[in-house]
Structures are given as C-alpha cells and as structure tokens.
Image: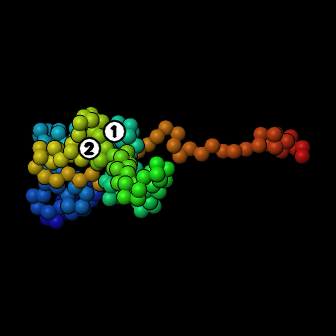
Amino acid sequence: MTGGVACGSCGTGLRENAKFCDECGAPTAVTGDTAEYKQVTALFADVVRSMHIAATDPRYIRKEDVTAEDLEREKDIYRAQAAQTGKPAPVIEKIVESGLKTYYKEVCLLEQAFIHDSGKSVAQAVKEAEGKVGGPIKVAGFLRYALGEGIEKQESDFAAEVAAASGQK
C-alpha cells in the first residue's frame, strides 16, 4: 500500500499503480469517463446488480463454491433416477456427471448462460471484459432480493384473540 490509498469496494490497501484490487478484484485505475470504465460498469450492471441475478437466481458464484452437502444430494438424486433405467454402474456414473454439469449451469453464476447473450456464459462475458480493460476481473459476490422474501407471516388464532379482548374464555 502506498500513500494510504484503499480500495473503494473492500477497503484493502492498494499497491502503487494497481489497476485492480488484490483482495476483491475491483477495478481501481479504471475510473471516470474512460471507455474501459464504461465497459466494466455496463458488464457489472448487467450481471451483478441487475436482472441476471434476479432472473436466474444463482446460489453460488462458481462450481467450486457448491457445498459438499448440496453436491451429494444432487448426486443421490441423479443416481436414483439413473438406477431406475437399469443401466450398468459405469453408465450411471456418466449420467450423474452429466446431471451435475446441468446442475452447475442452473445454480452457479459463472456457469450460467449470460442473459443478454445466451450463446456465452457469464464467465465468458467476464473474460471478454477482462480483455477490454487489460486485467483480471473477479466476481466476489452478489446479493439477491425477492419480493416478500424474509417476511414471516404471523400465525394467530383470531377467535382466541377476540375472546381474550372481550374477557371471555
């Protein structure tokens, strides 16, 4: 870190002349009205904070982030489905692996088809943006809100409330 300059995204100290934060991957030298800045912000507006996350509801950033518990659950589901076909064990394992590839494309952000160009994945769109700005871009996280999510409906017995309010039992 030089001169006390910190990343605007995560607060980590930056190296002198750093284009990207070593900790979170945020662009540091790509600011203002430059073409590179506009390309990077457009990509992140499309992917990280916009309709791609809302539309596809990813649970993980990359396939390496999938928990062992979720992975085993999915494998068990695919094994059970494949076992019903009566195929031999080696074929069943290939079916399971194929099913996992599909699962990753559903739940991992970087594996998903890019909503604005279904011919490429989000990872490919990020890679293209890296080429345009001349450095690595790291998707470090995302946050998705859904209407009504987290609101708990309070369960109550209306008749009991009326009886309690009127002093009856």
Query: Which residue is under mark 1?
Result: 52
Q: Describe the element under mark 2 as helix, strand or loop.
A: helix
Left or right: 157 in relation to 151:
right
Image height of 128 relative to 13, above or below? above
Left or right: 113 in relation to 133:
right
Q: Nearer the viewer, residue 59 or 82?
A: 82
The crowding category of the residue bearing disc 1, from other C-alpha atoms within 10 Å (few below 14, some 14 to 19, many at least 20), is many
Q: Describe the element under mark 1 as helix, strand or loop.
A: helix
Q: Quadrant of residue 120?
A: top left
Q: Residue at x 44, y 43 (%)?
A: 145
The crowding category of the residue bearing disc 2, from other C-alpha atoms within 10 Å (few below 14, some 14 to 19, many at least 20), is many
Image height of 65 relative to 103, above or below? below
Q: Position of residue 34 (x, y in %)?
A: 11, 40
Circle number at residue 122: 2
Q: CA distance from mark 1 to mark 2?
A: 9 Å
Point out the tag, 1 or 2, that comes first from the N-terminus: 1
Q: Nearer the viewer, residue 47 or 3?
A: 47
Quadrant where the N terminus lies?
A: bottom left
Q: Position of residue 121 (x, y in %)?
A: 25, 43
Q: Position of residue 77 (x, y in %)?
A: 47, 53
| Discs 1/2, front | 2
Q: Residue at x 77, y 39 (%)?
A: 158
Q: Nearer the viewer, residue 50 or 52?
A: 52
Identify which amino acid the numbered label 1 is placed on.
His
Q: Quadrant of residue 10?
A: bottom left
Identify which amino acid the numbered label 2 is placed on.
Val
Residue 108 can be seen, yes or no: no
Q: Residue at x 42, y 52 (%)?
A: 87
Q: Position of residue 18 (x, y in %)?
A: 13, 58
Mark 1 and mark 2 residues within 8 Å of each other at the beta carbon: yes
